[in-house]
Amino acid sequence: MGTDRKRTNKRILTIFGLAALVLAALALWGFSRGGNAPQSSAPAAAPQPAMPAMSEAQAKAEVRRLLTELDTFKGLSGFHDAGFSSKGLLSQPGRWRQDVTALQQRISEDRGLPPMLRAAPGQLLGLGLAYRQSKGRETAGTMVDREMVQKAIK
């Protein structure tokens, strides 16, 4: 009985091994033909024009505005419950998050701006998340994040 079981197990492993090889070969063949790229007859979209670079003063003003806006809703219970959702009664945090993300994408790679200023939008997002978690209260983490943002906009 033990020998039959070993033979059966060996056959099963052989079948699974062959199946894996066939699937791998099919996957390689599909990738070599561009199998994951959808074939469309529509012309390619024109590239979006790049946003003009922000001056240091503009970037600081925008970060300052977003920090002030965060302070207006960080203590609201609707924010603690719904977070950055743009649905429901409190849509300001959702819009705020979109604004911070847009600013982050716009200035994070701009080598003409100071590194602390380029990092400020990410720190603002972290600060917003920390305020939601702490229900708007200051913690050691929020104080550090706030201090870093404030240094960036001085």
Image (cartoon, rainbow, N blue to C red):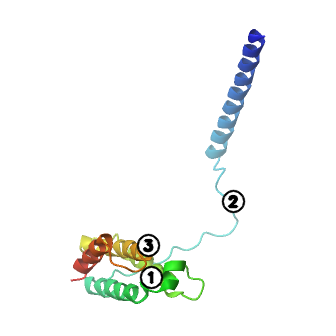
Q: Residue at x 32, y 73 (%)?
A: 139
Which residue, given by chain and number where applicable, does mark 2 sit on? Answer: 39
Q: Position of residue 150 (x, y in %)?
A: 25, 80
Which percent across, then down, holds residue 75?
Answer: 42, 85
Quarter the N terminus occupies = top right
User: Is 7 or 113 nearer to us in this picture?
Assistant: 7
Instruction: Kindly identify the residue that appears in the image at 37 percent across and 86 percent down.
Output: 71
Can residue 22 be seen at all in this image of the molecule?
yes
Left or right, residue 81 beside residue 43:
left
Q: Is residue 128 left or right of residue 154?
A: right
Query: Pointer 1 and pointer 2: residues touching (CB < 8 Å)?
Result: no
Quick one: label 1 or label 3, which is nearer the N terminus? Answer: 1
Between 9 and 38, the one lying in front of the other is 9
Three-letter residue code for mark 2: Gln
- Residue 149 image offset from top left, x and y in percent: 28, 77
- Residue 112 in view here: no
- Label 1 and label 2: CA atoms lie apart by 34 Å
